[in-house]
Amino acid sequence: MSTENKIVVWDVETTRLIERGGTSIERMEISVACALIFDFGDMKLEARDIMDRAERRVFWHEEVYPKRGECLDRLADLLSECKLHVAFNGIKFDMLVMKQHFMTPEAYKAACQRLYDPYEDLVKSIGSFSLASLLLTNGIQCKLGKGIDAPDLWDDKEYDELEEYCAADVDRLGKLVLQPSIRIPGYMMRLPMGTLAMLLDNMAVKDPPQVAVEAT
């Protein structure tokens, strides 16, 4: 199946939390990763229809695969071949922990070039916001739990719950970035930053658009 016209929204959970002065992010292990895959040709549809038509895939740590899901190397292939992929805080976290699963440095570089990170976009434009706060402000159902609980689910072999948590995060992020603009917590404004709308006409956009203040 060709992936060159796919837009991938994804997230990872790790087997443990980041420790100060501990192992680098690049050497952390991923327990599970979930991906929501849109066809570029569907992007002119209503957001609800896009979500309904999306493909959902789950990728697991080697201790669990192949009993369930796919291996993480398959996610690496998808990210290096797709048209665009979206990860919240993907630049400084998700892509770093995924790095070890790419076959070559060239494949990793290709994936980095295809990454759109709405968190980084907002940080550069307005400030730092958690995914939970953005979901709440934009009327999207909040996260099922907290990321800090994911390692405990892994340790306890609660794989169904771990997958449900990760997949729910990805679905909620998908709904957020499919909006034409998003409300920013604490501000009376909507921004095109943080969404896919600004990228649809020109996938090579490098500079974020100017802030658009919403009239009250």
Image: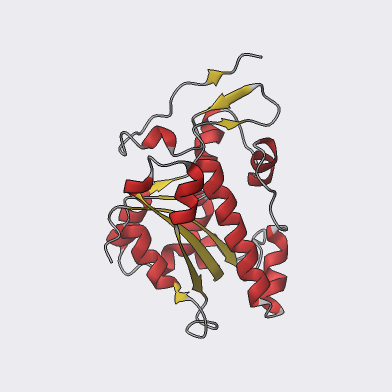
- Where residue 158 appears, as percent x and y from the top left, is 69, 77
Q: Nearer the viewer, residue 28 or 40?
A: 40
Judge left or right: residue 91 versus residue 160: left
Q: Quadrant of the C terminus?
A: top right
**Which image quarter: residue 131?**
top right
**Which image quarter: residue 79?**
bottom left
Q: Quadrant of the N terminus?
A: bottom left
Figure coloring: secondary structure
Q: Which residue is farthest top?
A: 215
Instruction: Check the image and report above or below for 19 versus 179.
Output: below
- Residue occupying image coordinates x 47% and y 48%: 49
- Where residue 172 appears, as percent x and y from the top left, is 59, 50
Instruction: Check the image and report above or below for 112 versus 102.
Output: above
Residue 143 visible in this rendered orientation of the protein = yes
Judge left or right: residue 78 versus residue 154: left
- Residue occupying image coordinates x 71% and y 61%: 148
Instruction: Check the image and report above or below for 192 versus 216.
Output: below
Q: Which residue is farthest bottom?
A: 67
Residue 88 visible in this rendered orientation of the protein = no
Judge left or right: residue 189 versus residue 84: right
Q: Nearer the viewer, residue 38 or 150?
A: 38
- Where residue 32 appears, as percent x and y from the top left, is 55, 70
- Residue occupying image coordinates x 66% and y 21%: 188
- Residue occupying image coordinates x 41% and y 32%: 198
**Which image quarter: residue 182?**
top right
